Amino acid sequence: MKELIRELVLQAVLDLRRDGHLPPGDEPVFTVERTRNKQHGDYACNAAMLMAKAAGRNPRELAQQLLDTLPQSRLVERAEIAGPGFINFFVSPTCLIGSLRRVLEQRDRYGWQPEESRESVTVEFVSANPNGPLHVGHGRGAAYGASLANILEAYGHKVQREYYVNDAGRQMDILAASVWLRYLELGGVQVRFPDNGYKGDYVVEIARALRAREGDRLRHPMFEVTDGLPPDESQGGDKETHVDALIARARKLLGEADYRIVFNAGLDWCLADIKQDLGEFGVRYDNWFSERSLATSGAVSKAIETLKSKGHMEERDGALWFKATQFGDEKDRVVVRENGVTTYFASDIAYLLNKFDRGFERAIYVFGADHHGYIARLKAAAQGLGVDPARLEIQLVQFAVLFEKGEKVQMSTRAGQFVTLRQLRAEVGADAARFFYVMRSHDQHLDFDLDLARSQSNDNPVYYVQYAHARVCALFRQLAEKGWSFNKAAGDAARERLVHEQEVALMNLLLGWPEIVGAAAQARSPQIVANGLRDLSSAFHSYYNAVPILVEDETLRAARLYLCKAVRQVLANGLALLGVSAPETM
């Protein structure tokens, strides 16, 4: 409807220009927005206010001319001027009842734009290091990224969902060392565990499986492991230096082939656990991209050579630096260290270039809020590689904090004392977790109330929305119990009888559903969909409580059931975008 009104106003502007009442110019920029107060119509347009100065006209006078020139449409009942020059539009009953037919004809595609009608985009989200189970912080990024991908797809984008597997890096080496020490411990070796090691129970589980496969073959006495290592933090030294030395010792004692067996034991277990966890959370991926493949495929070398060829690399003290400051970053970045080893940032650059080499027109990264510093450096890397930085988006997801009985639930990943995503799902269910994670804007901190998420009350937003869907389903069961049936054609024919104030309000919300999906896609904000579902549910619950639906009047009953069926469809569509189920009974 917004687009229709925009076209009507544009046509009026062109007609006024053609007749000499407005000076020629570019297509005017103006907005058409939903009104907050229905007394001011359904939509408001600010075209006259924005064009008045350039036209040398009074805004209200120009608004009147636009109104007088506005083409007629059976979907607009009337338009009128308000305030300093707004034009308010009232949609016609024909428009409202027509939305019901569109909902029930398009069904689960209602609110969707034509498939692949917009640019292709790759959305990378979660991408947690595979060094342990996912925790509740990862859960918010998962819910946000998955919902955003669904919404972008509904808006017409060709979407690829991607997980970047950090399978090459220091954290994975720390996990490997931790697994090996637990393996030794299970074999009777007295182990001193490093302060910076991974201490979760899952590490013991990985080590136990490793021991079942390898037996004592990877066993070494503890004095060989610890002899000559620098002191750990609790021994008066530095924990990072100690754990790095421990990793080097493990590589030396095991040899590269056996070290890789230990390394892969941790990687494979954690990655399989992550895949299962996300799958049970309703999150799917089209591609699991290996960081290690960037080096083996030559992608890192290609990216470095690209930057060199464009003159954006510089050698300093034996290291190779990307001159990021010339593109707005706060400092230049090391890409190749003095010892010839590439940095994490080298992989980041290669991965960025690889995304666009694969043909995507836009790349969206979903990062935790602690990755704020990545924005400038990735934008700088894009410019250095010759990629338009506007094609690169970085969405930062703020932290989620669990509360139970008013108390904050503590978490610590390294110490193994954290609430996993799996535990959260067991506590509140996947539906509540998915909805709660996205019902607040992703750039705001989220206090996740476990007690509220568990409750079966109208205060629980996901319960409230799902209950609206289940209530419609219950209506049709009650219909059958009365020995009546629903005839869709009869309901369609009787739509004109839907004149109750609350019926009009419901139809208005259904009419605006595609706009909600579009707004959520453009703002990269699933919260808009969640809010739209809550508004529709609230309107339906009010209608259900105030207006009898299963009335004796067969024609009126068919019309009201037709409306309810449309409400049910839009609720199901919106819940699907958020990865939440639409139950028929509750």
Image (cartoon, rainbow, N blue to C red):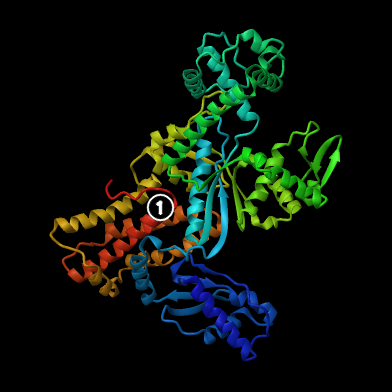
Q: Nearer the viewer, residue 393 or 43?
A: 393
Q: Residue at x 58, y 87 (%)?
A: 15
Q: Which amino acid, mark 1?
A: Ala
Q: The C terminus appears in which quarter of the rendering? A: top left
* Vertical arrangement, residue 239 with respect to residue 528, above or below: above
Residue 112 location (% of width, % of height)? 45, 63
Residue 533 is at least partly visible in this image: yes
Residue 191 location (% of width, % of height)? 58, 11
Q: Residue at x 45, y 64 (%)?
A: 514
- Most distant residue in the right direction: 317
Q: Which residue is mark 1?
A: 576
Residue 472 location (% of width, % of height)? 28, 56
Image quarter of residue 222: top right
Secondary structure beneath label 1: helix
Q: How many C-alpha atoms fall within 10 Å of the one at disc 1: few (<14), some, or many (≥20)?
A: some
Residue 231 location (% of width, % of height)? 70, 14
Q: Nearer the viewer, residue 551 or 369?
A: 369
* Vertical arrangement, residue 34 with respect to residue 288, above or below: below
Image quarter of residue 336: top right
